[in-house]
Image (cartoon, rainbow, N blue to C red):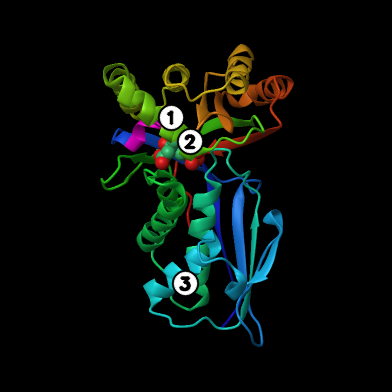
Amino acid sequence: MPAISASAPAKIILFGEHTVVYGHPAIAAPVHEVEARVTITAQPTRSGPPEIEAPQIGLKTTLDRLQADHPIACAFQLVAEALGLDHWPAFHLRLTSSIPVASGMGSSAATAVALVRALSAFMGHPLSDSEVCALAYRLEQRHHGTPSGIDNTVITFARPIFFVRHQPVEFLTFAKPIHLLIGDTGIKGLTREAVAGVRQRWEQDPIGYGNLFQAIADLTRRAKEALMQGEMEVVGTLMTENHRLLVEMGVSSPELNRLVEAALGAGALGAKLSGGGQGGIMIALVHPQNVHQVGQALREAGAVNVLSTEVPALPPSR
Ligand code: PMV
């Protein structure tokens, strides 16, 4: 069995986080920077159970010693079921990730996608993207309750998507590349809690929250057109409006709001939190010539990390 490597990118949600859980549309894009990837290598060894090493989380063990509900053990189990395997050969699996955890960049989904890809490829049966996506979704369900499926989908296909739960995914081709800065508050945001909080408030105020959800759904559809027409000012304005509605939904934080204000003050076309919120990251849409200025403003406003990324207009050739 030859050595293999597999990887998966981080992601950002451009529009529609949270409301996507309720069947409304959302737009997400992969982050192709090397500073935001999960990479896995698998190499045959002479004997023994699979060895697993994940330096970022201080893990160095063997498969038989992992708790059955550990995300890595679950990935082995699901892939074994999918391939009809009754045992694993001896090999060494090394997982490295540069995606900050609990930050809204899809670290858990990228880990799930990369594991499913690596394990199936190592066994000589690489699964198709659709199969990888479906298994990664099952892994996300085990660990995150009721995920919408947007994270595993955008990460598996590594292309911008217009996503509606339980509907076939729509791939988007933007009219122009878009330049974004990703500012990390450095505060961990627990998506599961943020999602549960929205549900509780929605149950208490179904009409008010229903109106907020509808307003985000409408601007997400408008944003799709604007991205496909290359109307960057419109995209930016809609991003900022989406942020304002997320603030009203109670999923932002003072730190996120400070970064959004700083980006807008430094000339960003638009800015919003991205992902589960209550910490984690925000994104700012910028003209390429403003990247430096907005990046500096984000750092001065408290961002612990700022990543510049471009979402290309055309899908990457793979
Ligand atoms: O925080 P993240 O990156 O897991 O993003 C979650 C997006 C939500 O819409 C808040 C939840 C979901 O399952 O879609």
Q: Residue 46 placed where, x, y %?
A: 66, 87
Q: Which residues are magenta?
A: 15-21
Residue beneath disc 2: 193
Tell me the amino acid under the disc marked 3. Answer: Ser
Mark 1–mark 2 Cα distance, whole angstroms, equals: 6 Å
Q: Secondary structure at mark 1?
A: helix
In contact (CB < 8 Å): disc 1 and disc 3: no
User: Label 3 crowding class (10 Å Cα cut-off): few <14, some 14-19, many 20+?
Assistant: some
Q: Nearer the viewer, mark 2 or mark 3?
A: 2
Q: Would you say the residues marked 2 and 3 are in contact, meaning their CB atoms lie under 8 Å apart?
A: no
Residue depicted at 56% across the width and 65% down the height: 67
Q: Residues within 10 Å of mark 2 (few under 14, many from 20)?
A: some
Q: Which residue is mark 3?
A: 120
Task: Please state the horizontal and vertical placement of residue 123, each as a whole percent of the image.
Answer: 49, 78
Residue at mark 1: 197
Q: Is residue 228 above or below residue 66?
A: above
